[in-house]
Image (spheres, rainbow, N blue to C red):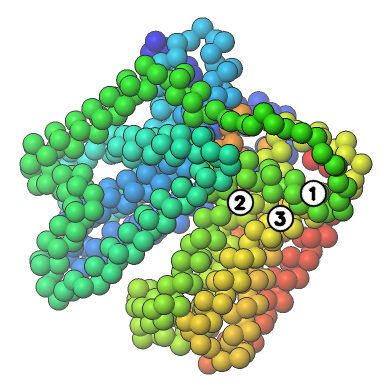
Amino acid sequence: MMKQILTLSRVQLKNLFGINEMRYSKDKKKKAAFALLAVAYLLVFLMVTAYVSSMSYAFHFMELGEIVPMYLYTIISLVMLVLSFFKAGSVLFSMKSYDIMVSLPVTKSAILISRFVTMYVTNLLFSSIVMLPGLAVHIYFAKPGLSFYLTSIPVILLAPLLPLTISSILGALIKGISSRMKHKSLVEVLLTMLLVVAVMLGSVGMGEQAETMDLEAVKELLSIVTVELGGIFPPALWYHNALQGNLAQLLLLLALPTIIFLVFVWILAKNFLEICAGLNASYAKQNYRLETLKAEHTLIALLKKEAKLYFSSSLYVTNTIIGYILALLLAGAVAVMGIEPLAEYMGASDYLPLVVQLMPFILSLPLCMTSTTSCTISMEGKTFWQLQVLPIKAADIYKGKLLWNLVLAAPFYILCVSLLLIGTKPDIITALHYILLPLVFLLFTIVLGLAVNLLFPVLNWDNEARVVKQSASTFVSMLVGIVSILVPAGTAVGLQLESYSFFHAVVELLFLAVTVVLYLLIFRKELISIMK
């Protein structure tokens, strides 16, 4: 069975990352998409490396280097928990790929374990990208002995197991609850968002507790932080104690996640088909009657079609709406607590007027982090031919997709700006830019997403995670959107102007012009040319 697991895992990983297409495709457009995706991944890797390394250096600078390993372990575990939770249901319990694999001469257990291996490898890559740069800085300053390496290597290798198990159980529970309800995708989205919001609020609570620590007494601070992290995530404390020579806690850290994972896989393997069938079941009433058919305006019909496509996939919704929820939480915090705590959290208490001027950029960052348009063409998948044969113009289809993203984002944008104005109480000119700047960035991100997806569509996919989370268009759209906000925000910080009204106006006009150009270029694209 091991040979089957390795073969299936290798095939799924190649499909997930599009390796075979990259190697054997003769399509220049696809090769360009892979090259662009590789560049985007490299930029993200460099950004993460710079951030984690500087964080590790900061801890050592404050003489808190001892907590770096456990801090990094806590961070990657929590992030892997959230990331695995988003895709556990669609990867582990997908019946689409199972129907294909079950016809092959492989066992059900091999199919299940290969899916776990796929998620394990992707999580291990992520954890290594985060932990290794931070640990490298820690090793440079702390110069630990051989026991540090003998302890850390197996800990890093087994780090994905516990988050993967917990996220799979939670994902199965949410998928199971929602599958019994009429609007199961919507229920699944709501339950997922509740969990994510709970995690984020818990993180805020951690930050508030950290603010109460005595920064003058370094040794006392070290013990406080160690206890705090241990209370939040006990395995992190076990890792810390293992590095201090506690062999019992090292064995506990390695054995407990492994045992829990193996028991969960064993139980799941025994009832895999029944669980998948139950989680993917749908229920419908038998009293369907054909009533009066209504004709609507083309754009309204397309808008409704986009809404149905959007809410048909919980993974699509959760990955594109999370930015709007983060923006709403940020604006709500400013409205309730004021802007001073935010400035203090950013370490800019002495630059409060600058933070006030930067608030439109700060709000725009989560608000424009994601868009539905970045994968809206790809989500059509194998039904894309239906758009091509409809007696409507390609421009109308593009308008429908752009309009749906606007309809989805509009309530969040209005609430965020309103809360921001309540919390900061700016003057009239500043308030005007609070309204205009996030709106311009929002329009830019929406149009940018569709433009990039038209350049790099992925229509031949078996798992939604391929287009929603791993596609070139999604990754490039998010990266370009974030950089487009950070660059002018960084420029604003560097200029240190007395008044930022003119600077804001220039940024608004510039990005509005770019948005118009992208919009015009989009409408020159024919649907049939996307397949070429």
Q: Nearer the viewer, mark 1 or mark 2?
A: 1
State whether residue 486 appears in this view.
no
* Residue occupying the far top of the picture: 105
Residue 98: x %, y % from top left = 54, 20
* Disc marking residue 404: 3
Going from N to C along the chain, the mark reached first, 2 or 3, is 3
Three-letter amino acid code at disc 2? Val
Residue 40: x %, y % from top left = 56, 49
Three-letter amino acid code at disc 1? Leu
The residue drawn where x is 10% and y is 67% is 220
Three-letter amino acid code at disc 3? Trp
Q: Nearer the viewer, mark 2 or mark 3?
A: 3
On screen, residue 298 versus residue 284, left or right, reads right
Above/below status of 461 relative to 351: above
Q: Quadrant of residue 142?
A: bottom left
Which secondary structure, mark 2?
Answer: helix
Residue 266: x %, y % from top left = 32, 20
Going from N to C along the chain, the mark reached first, 1 or 2, is 1
Q: CA distance from mark 1 to mark 2?
A: 26 Å
Quadrant into which the C terminus falls: top right
Q: Quadrant of residue 67?
A: bottom left
Above/below status of 394 relative to 162: below
* Disc marking residue 162: none
What residue is shown with label 2? 476
What residue is shown with label 1? 302
In the image shown, does 234 or 354 lie closer to the viewer? 234
Quadrant into which the N terminus falls: top left
Which secondary structure, mark 3?
Answer: helix
State whether residue 331 appears in this view.
yes
The residue drawn where x is 19% and y is 47% is 234
> Within 10 angstroms of label 1, few (less than 14), some, or many (20 or more) residues?
many
On screen, residue 258 versus residue 191, left or right, reads left
